[in-house]
């Protein structure tokens, strides 16, 4: 899965007066500040939680999410440490029911079933999961899985613990593409895993796919989409392959070991994903995400709408009470911390009004619902009188090019990308951000 976490563009650190050790980890926990601030937080209780489980069977060469190859010797220590962190985070929810939980990685399905029992029990003891357990509207409990590491026993345990949704890392149904991505499962394992999840009673099932893989043709991509859409799923994430810094695949590209997919083919593949999912009854609600009615990822929408969320586990990023923080991205460091689960934070910041507006424009522009224009204008003028004129200038330029439209939504207006503008989402968002910053 392409993460649940957003790129925070973290700056080191904005909370002053605290010393850093040589590794850049604060020796006094910034989460203590978050806990104090949360008591008077006008944004209300935090209703979402992300949990990062870093273990993988193999580090895929395109992936830049934090993970380590698992030998199972540190799983128990990790879960013990994670439970302590969850206990420390729980007061930030202020006793209000959580609405969304997302367990990502890594490969969470690699965690032993007995340790899943401990983790799920801890979650139910530390947080109010009543709305999730009742499967109330707008709730979700997602666990990422890989086809080669799931079992009926695991799915039964997840269902018993309240999990309502799985996100299956399929990536492709072609053996050659899977090998190029260094995935470990066979093409047939995906459908078997999805069927097992359905049989266990997991009501919402999503599949992740990757396109623009070197050697992948448009007919191959069509087959991947058609195969995925034939499964009992209600959500598809279709991501173009990106060459992230400091990954083995990017290093291979720099050595010219393969030729990347041409941009015109990427566009063709994106449009094919849009057309086939639409024909199958799915709606695009974010640049890379498609869902049947009512099946959009509520947790990821919380990120894109800039809601508050808690985060636990190595490298996990959180946002609450005006603070943003990121945990240490090293398991050894994470396991070594004490202080009631509070001191593993690696980066912390308090975004100012400009930064907050820029981030809302960046993430909101990716959504089919777009950005609330009137609110953005008001926030811009509160920062600097006349700044809204700069936003209107950017909006007008992209409207003239056919990439953006201003749509009336009841009493509010929204800036929304056109069908052709979706292909330029990052560029449009960058222009808005430049106007604000």
Image (tube, helix red, strand yellow):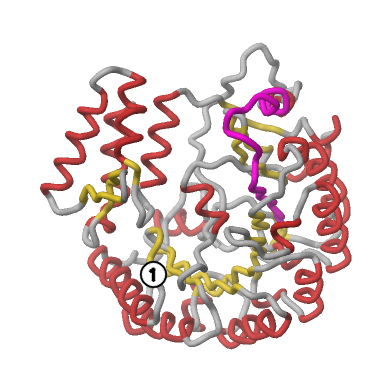
Residue lying at 34% horizontally and 45% vertically, measured from the top left: 371
Mark 1: few, some, or many residues within 10 Å (few <14, many ≥20)? many
Residue lying at 75% horizontally and 55% vertically, measured from the top left: 129
Q: In which quarter of the image is residue 282?
A: bottom left
Res 333 visible: no
Closer to us: 430 or 377: 377
Residue lying at 11% horizontally and 47% vertically, measured from the top left: 400
Query: Does residue 121 sit above or below 215 in this rendering?
Result: above
Res 73 visible: yes
Lateral position of residue 129 relative to residue 205, left or right? right
Return the residue at label 1.
Answer: 283
Is residue 36 on the magenta stretch? Answer: yes
Lateral position of residue 10 relative to residue 54, left or right? left
Which portion, as a residue range, is magenta? 34-54
Kindly state the secondary structure of the residue where label 1 is placed.
strand
Lateral position of residue 315 relative to residue 248, left or right? right
Q: Position of residue 411 (x, y in %)?
A: 31, 44
Is residue 74 on the magenta stretch? Answer: no
Q: Where is residue 389 in the image (x, y as percent from the top left)?
A: 20, 27
């Amino acid at each position: 899965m392409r993460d649940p976490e957003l790129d925070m563009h973290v700056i080191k650190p904005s909370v002053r007066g605290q010393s850093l050790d040589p590794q850049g980890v604060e020796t006094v926990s910034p989460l203590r500040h978050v806990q104090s601030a949360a008591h008077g937080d006008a944004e209300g209780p935090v209703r979402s939680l992300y949990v990062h489980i870093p273990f993988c069977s193999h580090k895929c060469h395109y992936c830049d999410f934090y993970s380590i190859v698992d030998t199972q010797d540190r799983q128990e220590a990790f879960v013990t440490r994670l439970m302590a962190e969850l206990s420390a985070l729980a007061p930030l929810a202020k006793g209000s029911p959580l609405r969304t939980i997302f367990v990502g990685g890594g490969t969470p399905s690699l965690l032993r079933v007995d340790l899943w029992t401990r983790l799920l029990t801890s979650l139910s003891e530390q947080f109010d999961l009543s709305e999730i357990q009742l499967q109330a509207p707008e709730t979700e409990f997602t666990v990422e899985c890989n086809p080669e590491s799931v079992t009926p026993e695991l799915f039964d345990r997840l269902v018993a613990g309240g999990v309502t949704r799985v996100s299956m890392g399929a990536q492709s149904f072609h053996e050659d593409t899977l090998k190029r991505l260094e995935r470990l499962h066979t093409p047939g394992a995906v459908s078997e895993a999805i069927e097992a999840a359905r049989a266990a009673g997991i009501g919402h099932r999503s599949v992740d796919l990757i396109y623009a893989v070197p050697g992948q043709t448009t007919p191959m991509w069509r087959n991947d989409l058609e195969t995925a859409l034939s499964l009992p799923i209600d959500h598809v994430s279709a991501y173009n392959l990106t060459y992230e810094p400091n990954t083995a695949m990017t290093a291979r590209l720099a050595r010219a070991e393969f030729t990347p997919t041409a941009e015109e083919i990427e566009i063709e593949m994106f449009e094919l994903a849009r057309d086939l999912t639409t024909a199958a009854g799915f709606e695009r609600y974010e640049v890379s995400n498609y869902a049947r009615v009512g099946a959009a990822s509520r947790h990821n929408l919380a990120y894109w709408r800039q809601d508050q969320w808690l985060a636990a586990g190595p490298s996990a990023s959180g946002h609450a009470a005006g603070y943003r923080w990121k945990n240490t991205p090293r398991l050894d460091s994470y396991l070594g911390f004490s202080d009631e689960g509070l001191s593993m934070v690696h980066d912390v910041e308090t975004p100012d009004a400009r930064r907050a507006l820029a981030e809302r424009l960046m993430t909101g522009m990716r959504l089919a619902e777009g950005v609330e224009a009137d609110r953005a204008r008001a926030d811009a003028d509160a920062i600097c009188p006349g700044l809204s004129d700069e936003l209107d200038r950017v909006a007008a330029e992209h409207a003239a090019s056919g990439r953006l439209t201003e749509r009336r939504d009841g009493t509010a207006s929204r800036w929304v990308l056109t069908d052709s503008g979706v292909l330029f989402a990052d560029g449009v968002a960058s222009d808005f951000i430049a106007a604000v910053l």
